[in-house]
Amino acid sequence: MTTSNSPIYDLLLHGGTVYDPANGISGEKRDIAISGSVIAAVEPEISPSLARRTANVSGMIVTPGLIDLHAHFFGYFGAIQPDPLCLSTCVTTAVDAGGSGHLTFDHFNETVISRSTTRVFALLNIAGEGMVGEPEQDLEGMSAELTENKIAQRPDLIVGVKVAHYGGPDWEPLDRGVEAAKRTGTFVMVDQSPSASRPMDEMILKHMRDGDIVTHCYAVSKPMTDANDKVREYFFKARDRGVLFDVGHGAGSFSWRIAQAAVDQGFLPDTISTDLHRHSYLTNQATMPETMSKMLVCGVPLADVVEMSTWRPAQKIGHPELGTLSVAGIADVAVLRQARTHADDGLGFTDNGSSGNRVRRAGHRLEPEITIKGGSVAWDRNGLTRDDWQYTVTQDDRLP
């Protein structure tokens, strides 16, 4: 029997500033109670006496678990394991962007997806073997039909199609990718730099559809802006017809100059992602909080940055049960600390691309504090959800 003094929640996040775009909460103080694997209550104030554990997150930002729409966990030589760099950076859900194709997805699922605490989805590479060097140049291995069949087998894990890195003269890989996505009711994410025979305007205006995504949108290799730092008109036209644009930071795909010019001209990204792999992490610290921080430095409001990192990608991958703090929903929660320095230029943020790695300085940065995945604390930087060490049980000298 539960009495009025008995705890009814497993964990209470107390005093945080909550951003939950799906529920229209933007920078408001809310307490969040978790029971088991679900959000039990979201209220202006919940008594700590009702929870078995309480974490005081006053002054911190609380959001749904972050969703990284573009990362690399398989196939690519720089691929990483999901859990160490996702859960430690408030990411509870991530999408592998084309590491596997229809020939290799089952191995990816067996060795990575099924063994990860991070919730991992996949964009299936149109290349049958996935992102393993030359197969991405092998037209014979790119089958819309076989890609469609594999997606139909595992729609619970495969959320779309990836087309990338093709160096040939034609549009065949993209057109086959679009065909596979059309047949399966999904979308295509494209990483394709322009060439003389494949200009950028033709790609995004003629070959991509409403809902398809251009990743690395602020890359020097694309590029979005002209010699006068003006966003090219055809990017606005592509957006008007429904093409989406994703950050995909990476180790060579984010230019401060392009990003700032685009934001100043109203061309914000639709989604924020990392293109996380070994090199991008070591060179640019391209985690979700770091990439989100860079968009804040460019002047994108925090509420928009959170939406681009939670609710929008959740809807895009067809999982609206994620990216929200709805009561009775999955308890995926991110707690971030907004670190500030006394000087406006005290912190450095590095970009990349053919112009080199260049630093921009600012006075604030989002830092991961707590990650909760399905109600379980997966990361707690400062032990806010833990019992104090002084409550350690004394030992009685008996051997275990």
Image (tube, rainbow, N blue to C red):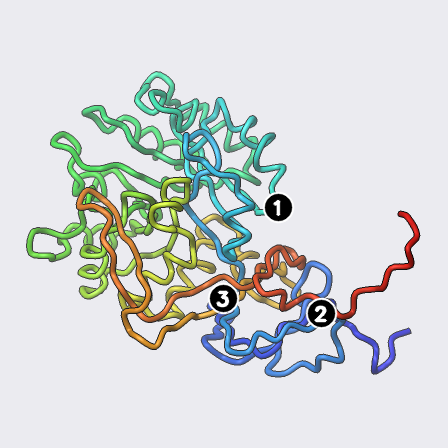
Q: Nearer the viewer, mark 3 or mark 2?
A: 2
Residue indicated by mark 3: 336
Of residues 88 and 20, which is closer to you in this image? 88
Tell me the distance, in whole angstroms, between the alpha carbons under discs 1 and 3.
20 Å
First in residue order: circle 1 vs circle 3:
1
Where in the figure is residue 242, as x and y percent of width and height? 30, 52
Where in the figure is residue 271, as x and y percent of width and height? 37, 55
| Residue depicted at x 91% and y 73% | 1
Amino acid bearing label 1: Thr
- Are the residues flagged by discs 3 and 2 in contact, CB closer than 8 Å? no
For disc 1, the neighbor class at 10 Å (few under 14, some 14 to 19, many from 20) is: some
For disc 2, the neighbor class at 10 Å (few under 14, some 14 to 19, many from 20) is: few
Where in the figure is residue 163, as x and y percent of width and height? 34, 34
- Mark 2 secondary-structure assignment: loop
Residue indicated by mark 2: 388
- Mark 1 secondary-structure assignment: loop
Amino acid bearing label 3: Leu
- Mark 3 secondary-structure assignment: strand
